[in-house]
Image (cartoon, helix red, strand yellow):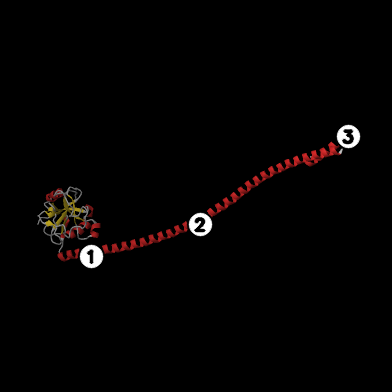
């Protein structure tokens, strides 16, 4: 069994008194007082030591409590701060998602609106092109019918369809040489057949454009005719000028337009175009300008008058 410091001090005091009594048979008041003073001194030292130990324990306990409290407060604040940040971020994310949904809905609406407008525009353009091409084609067909009446086109002045000739409404005879040539060799090829490179009348050119597109489409969409650049103007083989504002020129400012500048007089030659796309956009305007040296175009020949 362990004694407390106070019990131990009392026990020592009693032992000292007992030893004093056993030594001389009695104990004087002075000895008792000395023993008491000694005990008080030891007791005081024990109390001071105990207080110091208690203070040290209290300080250590306060430090631990303070650290624990600080850690706990920090943990609580940290959790609350994290929770608050998460709530703010969740709210912002929700707002962004809502905004994106609204933008997505707007984009879908815009896409549908644009698609609807494009479809309407496509239908309008298609109807206009079809109507215009139909009217122009019908007008040319009517002119052909009116000019020829009931006359058979198979044979007239030696112009036979069987031999590959085409008789125009004005009575001129044309022939397609289904070979590829440049402009000079096209002239020579026609002359080798006893023909000349074609110089269609203004009324024949739109008719030829339609007939060649329908009948000789596999030959190619561009045909050389007997017109070329002389100086700054285009001329037919007989010297007749084809002005830049002639109504049979295909309109525009690309390389096929007659108004482009040229350095040499024989760089550009006249072509009769049967491109279906060009015919839809500008029917009845078959002439274009092209490079005379291009050798993948077809000669359009004509019987000499």
Q: Secondary structure at mark 1?
A: helix
Discs 3, 1 touching: Cβ within 8 Å: no
Give me the residue at 80% from left, 39% from top. 37
Q: Nearer the viewer, residue 60 or 220?
A: 60
Give me the residue at 23% from left, 53% from top. 218
Quadrant location of the N terminus in the rendered image: top right
Relative to 60, residue 133 above or below = below
Q: Residues within 10 Å of mark 2 (few under 14, many from 20)?
A: few
**Mark identifier at residue 104:** none
Q: CA distance from mark 1 to mark 2?
A: 65 Å
Q: Earlier in the sequence, mark 3 or mark 1?
A: 3
Residue bearing mark 3:
22
Give me the residue at 60% from left, 50% from top. 73
Residue bearing mark 1:
135
Q: Secondary structure at mark 3?
A: helix
Residue bearing mark 2:
91
Q: Nearer the viewer, residue 208 or 229?
A: 229
The answer to whether any part of residue 168 appears in the image is no
Q: Is residue 195 left or right of residue 210?
A: left
Residue furthest toward the front? 30
In x, y percent, where is residue 88?
52, 55
Q: CA distance from mark 3 to mark 2?
A: 92 Å
Q: Earlier in the sequence, mark 1 or mark 2?
A: 2
Q: Is residue 246 left or right of residue 38?
A: left
- Select label 3 or label 1 by which is in front: 3
Residue furthest toward the right? 25
Q: CA distance from mark 3 to mark 1?
A: 156 Å
Q: Residues within 10 Å of mark 1 (few under 14, many from 20)?
A: few
Q: Quadrant of residue 148?
A: bottom left
In x, y percent, where is residue 234?
14, 54
- Select label 1 or label 2 by which is in front: 2
């Amino acid at each position: 069994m362990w004694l407390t410091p106070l019990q131990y001090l009392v026990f020592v005091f009693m032992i000292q008194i007992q030893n004093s009594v056993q030594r001389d048979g009695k104990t004087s008041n002075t000895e008792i007082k000395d023993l008491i003073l000694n005990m008080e001194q030891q007791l005081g030292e024990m109390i001071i030591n105990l207080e110091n130990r208690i203070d040290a324990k209290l300080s250590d306990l306060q430090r631990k409590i303070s650290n624990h409290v600080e850690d706990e407060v920090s943990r609580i604040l940290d959790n609350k701060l994290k929770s608050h940040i998460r709530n703010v971020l969740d709210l912002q994310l929700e707002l962004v998602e809502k905004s994106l949904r609204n933008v997505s809905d707007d984009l879908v609406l815009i896409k549908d609106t644009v698609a609807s407008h494009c479809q309407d525009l496509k239908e309008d353009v298609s109807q206009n092109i079809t109507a215009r091409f139909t009217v122009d084609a019908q007008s040319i067909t009517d002119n052909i019918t009116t000019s020829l009446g009931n006359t058979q086109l198979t044979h007239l002045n030696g112009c036979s369809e069987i031999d590959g000739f085409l008789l125009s409404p004005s009575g001129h005879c044309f022939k397609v040489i289904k070979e590829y040539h440049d402009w000079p060799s096209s002239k020579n090829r026609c002359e080798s057949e006893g023909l000349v490179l074609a110089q269609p009348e203004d009324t024949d050119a739109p008719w030829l454009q339609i007939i060649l597109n329908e009948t000789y489409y596999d030959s190619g969409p561009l045909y050389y005719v007997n017109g070329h650049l002389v100086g700054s103007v285009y001329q037919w083989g007989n010297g007749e000028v084809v002005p830049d504002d002639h109504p049979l020129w295909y309109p525009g400012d690309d390389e096929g337009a007659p108004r482009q500048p040229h350095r040499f007089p024989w760089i550009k030659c006249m072509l009769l175009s049967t491109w279906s796309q060009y015919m839809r956009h500008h029917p009845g305007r078959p002439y274009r300008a092209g490079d005379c040296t291009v050798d993948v175009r077809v000669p359009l020949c004509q019987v000499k008058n």
